[in-house]
Amino acid sequence: MILRRIITQIKNFFPAPEVHAHCDGPCGVYDPASARITAEAVVSMTKKIMDLEIPAADDKAAYIAYQNTLSRYVAIKEEQAQKTKDDLLILWTDYFKPVHLEKYPDLHDTFWKAAKLCSACKVEVSAEHANELMEAVHKIHDMFWATKERDVNWYKAS
């Protein structure tokens, strides 16, 4: 009881200033580049998986090495697809606001489809879906930077 009165008096003596923010975090912390990087990894791992040569069944050592490599590529692909999804969902839910829908009426559909592509890339090995994911991330990149009235070039590492 006494502690509450002391805390109340301290709060009254040192009131917190009212603040306003566009985003959940300080402006400037959002950037779709991380989604591009992880989506590129999804494309890369998908290609690597599809290019793996299956060894002869009677070559046990080669088959074990193949299984190990395949397992690693799949794990990386799924992990990077999930990271892409996480990055996109943060942009969608924390950065983009109703005012952005006026300029981009397909914003929600774009993000929803991109998130679905991330899921598809996790559960299957599809170069088509991996490339569609890159295209979706590219579109989101363009939308994001346009909201900041900046022309930031799209580039890929590979």
Image (cartoon, rainbow, N blue to C red):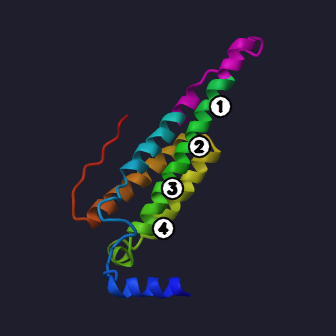
Image location (x, y in percent) of residue 143: 33, 62
Could you tell which of marks 3 and 1 lies nearer the N-terminus? 1
Q: Amino acid at mark 2?
A: Glu
Element under disc 2: helix
Could you tell which of marks 1 and 2 lies nearer the N-terminus? 1
Which region is colored magenta?
Answer: 46-66
Query: At 39% from the left edge and 84% from the top edge, which residue is drawn?
Result: 11
Marks 4/3: CA–CA distance: 17 Å
Tell me whether circle 3 and circle 1 mark residues in contact (CB < 8 Å).
no
Tell me whether circle 4 and circle 1 mark residues in contact (CB < 8 Å).
no
**Neighbour tally class for label 1: few under 14, some 14-19, many 20 plus, Cα within 10 Å:** few
Q: Amino acid at mark 1?
A: Ser
**Neighbour tally class for label 2: few under 14, some 14-19, many 20 plus, Cα within 10 Å:** many
Could you tell which of marks 2 and 4 lies nearer the N-terminus? 2
Residue 61 within the magenta-colored segment of the rendering? yes
Q: Amino acid at mark 4?
A: Asp
Marks 1/2: CA–CA distance: 11 Å
Q: Which residue, given by chain and number where applicable, does mark 3 sit on?
A: 86
Return the mark for residue 109.
Answer: 4
Marks 2/4: CA–CA distance: 23 Å
Query: At 34% from the left edge and 78% from the top edge, which residue is drawn?
Result: 99
Please state if 25 lies on the left or on the right of 113 as rendered: left
> Which quarter of the rendering shows the N terminus?
bottom right
Marks 3/1: CA–CA distance: 23 Å
**Neighbour tally class for label 4: few under 14, some 14-19, many 20 plus, Cα within 10 Å:** few
* Closer to the eye: label 4 or 1: 1
Q: Which residue, given by chain and number where applicable, does mark 1 sit on?
A: 71
Question: Is 47 placed above or below 95 here?
Answer: above
Query: At 71% from the left edge and 19% from the top edge, which residue is drawn?
Result: 64
Return the mark for residue 78.
Answer: 2
Q: Count of labels shown?
A: 4
